[in-house]
Image: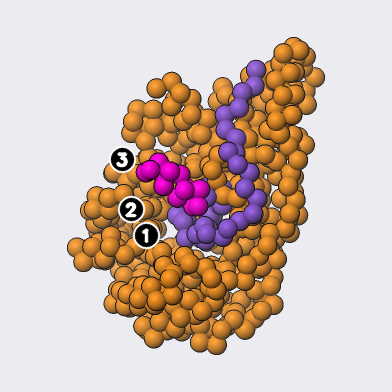
Amino acid sequence: MIKTVAKPTKRNITGCGECRSTCQSACKTSCTVGNQSCERVTRESKIEKDN
Amino acid sequence: MLPCSVISMIHVFQFQDKHYVYDVGSGALHECDEKTARFLSGEKVSLSRSELDEIETLEKEGLLYAEEVKTYPKKSDKVKALCLHICHDCNLRCKYCFADEGAYHAAREMMPFGTAKTAIDFLLRESGDRTTLEVDFFGGEPLMNLDVVKQTVYYAKEEAAKRGKRFLFTTTTNGLLLNDETIKFFNEEMENVVLSLDGRKEVHDAVRKTPNGKGSFDAVIDKAKKFVQSRGDKHYYVRGTFTAKNLDFADDVLFLADQGFDSISMEPVVTDIEELKIKEEHLPIIEKEYERLCVEYIKRMQRGEGFNFFHFNVDLEGGPCLEKRISACGAGNEYFSVVPNGDLYPCHQFAGDEKWRMGSVFEGIQRQDIREEFAKNCLFTRKKCGDCFAKFICSGGCSANNQHFCGDMNDPYPLTCAMMKKRIECALHVLAQRKAFQERN
């Protein structure tokens, strides 16, 4: 048995650069990009939800 | 217990009785039974036709053994963020402070408003057509220079508005000077606040001391709680440091959660102090501790008492784009630290080290050679990351840590890597368990 838990909804390759710099997050020493979300996608989903 | 293994581009691992397969190329996560996990780990295990069909279907869908995209990032030469060392002085003398207890191996000094203003002008000028810019007020303790922080925020907002840009401000503080005035200001102006607290009183007080040698826990905890209660839905993190003295740091994270803090990070110390530094022999204990935290984290989430632990976040569905994942943090190219006299360094961890001084906000970036070195930095310049399952999540780690421990920013520090991989496995398990819980309810 194998079942998919999560997969990228869209494999976005080209960056828009709108995301915040990694070092502005929580840790200031061992920040990882993967702990963040795409800010544009998050913003667009929020607008969609609000509408 | 199955061994963890990287086979081709998949990572098969076990967390308690759960078996997972993380596909590195696609970023998909699958849960499977033990037999399938053994098969995918390369063991000689017979699978039924239908079990093999499931695997083949995932392969066809590009969710298993997916080809890794190899593309070098298009590095921007626009600056997007500054870490303003608004105060190279501190009202604490934390034993592990990488910044020499706030002084950064130089005289204790405050950044004058003129320098901060020039830094804002530098960022606005060097940001090109970027619309969102970031400034982190850092120290030492930034609240010791509150007037300049305020003046800088108001100046930056005014100048940004003229240019159709906006600023996101962060302050990193030890919380000692939090009061009604500073709390109000933070809630009005700071997009994020990082508040340093190490956890249990005895752990905090052992390292976070006042200049007269007393522990600072009692002086901070109530202020921190008051601030967080007033914060509403705005971002903050309570950020702790664990050392060799508190390898049972899960108790500190849970203690902080019990105090009402619901956004927490806990970082391994970066220090050469023998009694505090994390050593290889500590690794098995630390890995177990992350597992213990993970188990309790999920239990609390299921009881409706969940909190956010920074390193257990991983967003496989809407996470950062590939460009971001391979670009790493941007230090030294699109992100700089500015010390009180206006000098520029690649990031706060390089501040004060003359060989990494890149120029100043007054004269601009003079060491283009250093900038180019950072700009070409990416996941693929870190050769040891090539066969690591975690690479598209961690991006090759922190350049400063790599430089500090290995003498080369492209040479990842194995101990940091091991902790990172464990945290990522925990984060993937949390993701799977959260989804399963949501489906059940």
| Callout 3: chain | B
- Compute the Cα span from label 3 to label 1: 24 Å
Residue B97 locus on image (x, y percent):
45, 65
Given this view, does label 2 or label 3 mark the residue nearer the observer? 2
Label 3 element class: helix
* SS category of the residue bearing label 2: loop
Residue B410 location, quadrant: bottom right
Residue underneath mark 3: B258
- Is the magenta region chiefly helix, strand or loop? helix
Q: Colour of chain A?
A: purple
- Chain letter for the orange colouring in the rendering: B
Quadrant where the N terminus of chain B is found in the figure: top right
**Residue drawn at (64%, 81%) of the image:** B367
Read off the chain for label 1: B
The residue that label 1 is drawn on is B191
Q: In the image, is residue B350 above or below residue B41?
A: below
Q: Tell me the kind of residue under disc 2.
A: Lys
| Residues in magenta, as a range | A39-51
Q: Position of residue B396 (x, y in %)?
A: 65, 54
Residue occupied by mark 2: B234
Residue B216 placement, left or right of B423: left
Under mark 3, the amino acid is Asp
Sequence-first tag of 2 and 3: 2
Chain letter belonging to callout 2: B
